[in-house]
Image: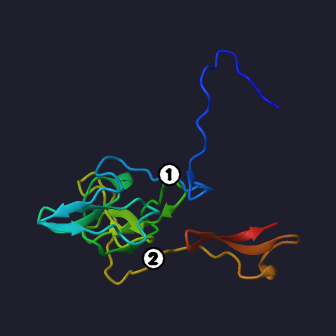
């Protein structure tokens, strides 16, 4: 069966094949900066692509010191060193990325809320360090990567016909509850 649309004069582009198979990888969203396949050099050294940076779209960048850093374009243009201090803080808002990944809110050393990179090496990404940035109480002992309410832990906690389950989001359980 062939369908024709009135006024349509071009054929649809064929699906892109990769090694003989359909390419079904989700798109990688970028907001400026170098293309994903371009290399970034800082102070004469080529900066490596971050391991596990696909979820948030982390890309290499140059710090003012000339060292290699990382940035998440969807969370601002700030270039940071990996392993930023801070842990998940429920007083800070979470951020949902376009691909559905959720970064929980965290509190950085300057008492500002950020987004915790549990997918890659950045740690607590504080986007707004100005006076307008949401404030929080920084605790250097707070090292949680994820905080999730657990309202049930077995069938005795759920009503008839429901079961206690958890959702796995990008390798970490992020929601527990009673569901049919």
In the image, is 7 to the left or to the right of 170?
A: right
**In the picture, residue 69 is in which quadrant?**
bottom left
Q: Nearer the viewer, residue 137 or 99?
A: 99
Tag 1–tag 2 contact (CB < 8 Å): no
Q: Locate the N terminus by quadrant.
A: top right
Instruction: Tell me the residue at 88%/72% (across/down).
Output: 160
Q: Secondary structure at mark 2?
A: loop
Q: Secondary structure at mark 1?
A: loop
Query: In this figure, which residue is indicated by the disc labeled 1?
Result: 27
Query: In this figure, which residue is indicated by the disc labeled 2?
Result: 145
Q: Locate the C terminus by quadrant.
A: bottom right
Mark before the other along the chain sequence, 1 or 2:
1
Residue 133 x, y percent position in the rendering? 30, 55
In the image, is 18 to the left or to the right of 63?
A: right
**In the picture, residue 145 is in which quadrant?**
bottom left
Instruction: Tell me the residue at 40%/68% (across/down).
Output: 116
Instruction: Tell me the residue at 41%/66% (across/down).
Output: 53
């Amino acid at each position: 069966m062939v369908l024709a649309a009135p006024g349509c004069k071009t054929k649809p582009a064929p699906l892109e094949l990769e090694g003989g198979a359909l390419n079904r990888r989700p798109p990688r969203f970028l907001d400026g900066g170098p293309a994903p396949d371009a290399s970034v050099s800082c102070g004469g050294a080529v900066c490596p692509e971050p391991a596990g940076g696909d979820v948030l779209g982390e890309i290499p960048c140059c710090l003012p010191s000339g060292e290699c850093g990382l940035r998440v374009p969807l969370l601002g243009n700030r270039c940071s060193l990996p392993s930023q201090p801070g842990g998940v803080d429920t007083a800070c808002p979470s951020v949902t990325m376009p691909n559905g990944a959720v970064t929980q809110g965290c509190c950085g050393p300057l008492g500002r809320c950020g987004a915790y990179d549990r997918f890659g090496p950045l740690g607590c990404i504080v986007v707004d360090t100005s006076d307008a940035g949401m404030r929080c109480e920084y605790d250097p002992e707070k090292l949680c990567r994820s905080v999730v309410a657990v309202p049930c832990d077995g069938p005795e906690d759920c009503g008839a016909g429901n079961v206690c389950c958890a959702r796995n989001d990008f390798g970490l359980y992020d929601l527990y509850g009673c569901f049919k």
